[in-house]
């Protein structure tokens, strides 16, 4: 199966806020895998991204980024902030977090 081409980088070091996470759902594009959707705000905590961000345990860098711990923290209702790569889909005019790259993660009080 061919990998989907990633949208271009819009901001390589955006301030992002991870404000929530969905429950697990079965993946249609990756049979046998479950995914979760992230609620993400860009630049400020009250600026929701216009696109959508997803994670699953089979994605590249899942463990290196720390998604097992991040999903647990978000599932407890906490908000996290980090530096992340934001991409833009120009056809749909959507901006969203590339969940493969997060750095300097911090808990928001």
Image (cartoon, grey):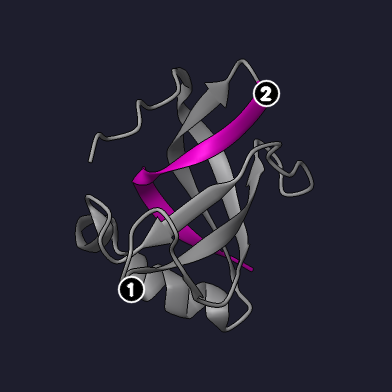
Q: Nearer the viewer, residue 50 or 76?
A: 50
The residue positioned farthest toward the right in the image shown = 46
Q: Residue 92: which disc?
A: 2
- Give coordinates of residue 72: x percent, y percent: 45, 80
Tell me: residue 2, above or below residue 23.
above
Residue 73 as seen in the image, left or right of residue 60: right
Magenta segment boundaries in residue numbering: 92-109
Tell me: residue 98, above or below residue 21.
above
Query: What is the quadrant of residue 91 in the picture?
Result: top right
- Residue at x-position 65% and y-position 35%: 43
Tell me: residue 99, above or below residue 50.
below
**Quadrant in which the C terminus is drawn:** bottom right
The residue positioned farthest toward the bottom in the image shown = 76
**Quadrant in which the N terminus is drawn:** top left
- The residue beneath circle 1 is 68
Q: Is residue 20 magenta?
A: no
Query: What is the quadrant of residue 68 in the picture?
Result: bottom left
- Residue at x-position 67% and y-position 23%: 92
- Residue at x-position 27% and y-position 35%: 3
């Amino acid at each position: 199966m061919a990998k989907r081409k990633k949208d271009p980088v819009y901001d390589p070091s955006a301030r992002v806020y991870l404000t929530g996470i969905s429950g697990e759902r079965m993946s249609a594009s990756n049979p046998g895998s479950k995914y979760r959707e992230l609620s993400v705000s860009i630049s400020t905590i009250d600026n929701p991204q216009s696109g959508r961000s997803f994670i699953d345990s089979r994605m590249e860098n899942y463990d290196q980024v720390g998604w097992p711990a991040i999903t647990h923290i978000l599932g407890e209702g906490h908000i996290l902030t980090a530096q992340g790569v934001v991409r833009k889909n120009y056809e749909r005019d959507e901006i969203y977090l590339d969940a493969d790259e997060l750095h300097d993660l911090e808990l928001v009080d």
